[in-house]
Image (tube, rainbow, N blue to C red):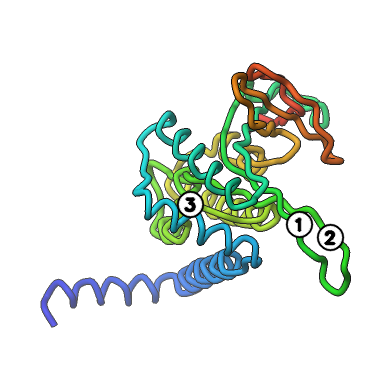
Amino acid sequence: MGSLGEEELEKLVIDYIESPVTFSDQMEKSSRALITLKEILGTTREEEMEIEEKINAFMKRRRLSYEGDDEKKEVMKKIVSKLRSDGYNASISKTSWDSSYDHLEGCRVFRCTRKYEYIDVMVTSHRDGDDVRKLNRVIIDLDFKSQFELAKQTKDYKEITGMLPKVFVASEERLKRVVSLVCGEMKKSMKEEGMCRPPWRTSRYMQAKWLPENRRRRVSCSKRESWSVFDDDGEADTMSGGGTRSKTTCCLPIF
């Protein structure tokens, strides 16, 4: 063993002796988070796996890639067209939410209107144990991993984000679980790096990007762009010409 290796080993031993409990706790928590994230990412329904395989094969065959929002939007349109031709109810969804005032907290909050685009697919499946058909939403995000990038990050957080796929295909429930877990690890990483966590890095704010109550789905239209705003019952209120009316307000307190 070289001298550099001996020095590193000695440092590890000293660190362990000086703070055995803290070191062990951190390792255990880090391992638990990685295992949990792996389980969530690996727990996919049949319709999710099928759609993901189709998208990956299509992007590889057509050599689709992008740089910037404009190219990304074109790739999204091609994927939606492909899915529709295969019989899927696929659309580009745009979420828009405004953090202006939190009536529950009764305080001023970060004021800013945010917008985000992704693909969603409405699929029907049978509930377990009966013949009742249920409508599920499958979310397709072509830039999921980059949403959690930090300028400064700990090694543990880098391992967490390293597990995230760039193209993420998941049910709404599974996506929420992933976002909640990663945002929790993000909070720890920013604290260890001496960074203050801004409101738009909280789990609640991050999830707003994909929440159904904030979305508008683009309806196929020959000349004019049309968007449909869906309420909780799945009924639509259609707007033509690319209107910007949002369905709900997402408010977050400053801290």
Mark 3 neighbour class, 10 Å CA radius: few under 14, some 14 to 19, many 20 or more:
some
Residue bearing the label numbered 3: 167
The answer to whether residue 190 is left or right of residue 254 is left
**Disc with the residue nearer the chain's start (3 vs 2):** 2
* Residue 229 image offset from top left, x and y in percent: 75, 30
Q: Secondary structure at mark 1?
A: strand
The answer to whether residue 116 is left or right of residue 132 is left
Residue bearing the label numbered 2: 133
Q: Nearer the viewer, mark 3 or mark 2?
A: 2
* Residue type pointed to by label 3: Val
* Residue type pointed to by label 2: Arg
Q: What residue do we see at 65% from left, 28% from top?
A: 96
Q: What residue do we see at 44% from left, 70% from top?
A: 19
Q: Say above or below: 229 vs 187.
A: above
* Residue 24 image offset from top left, x and y in percent: 49, 73
**Disc with the residue nearer the chain's start (1 vs 2):** 1
Q: Nearer the viewer, residue 133 or 67?
A: 133
* Residue type pointed to by label 1: Thr
Q: Say above or below: 23 vs 185.
A: below
Distance from label 1 to label 2 (Cα)? 6 Å
Q: Residue furthest bottom?
A: 1
Distance from label 3 to label 1 (Cα)? 22 Å
Residue bearing the label numbered 1: 124
Mark 1 neighbour class, 10 Å CA radius: few under 14, some 14 to 19, many 20 or more:
some
* Residue 208 image offset from top left, x and y in percent: 66, 38
Q: Are marks 1 and 2 in contact (CB under 8 Å)?
A: yes
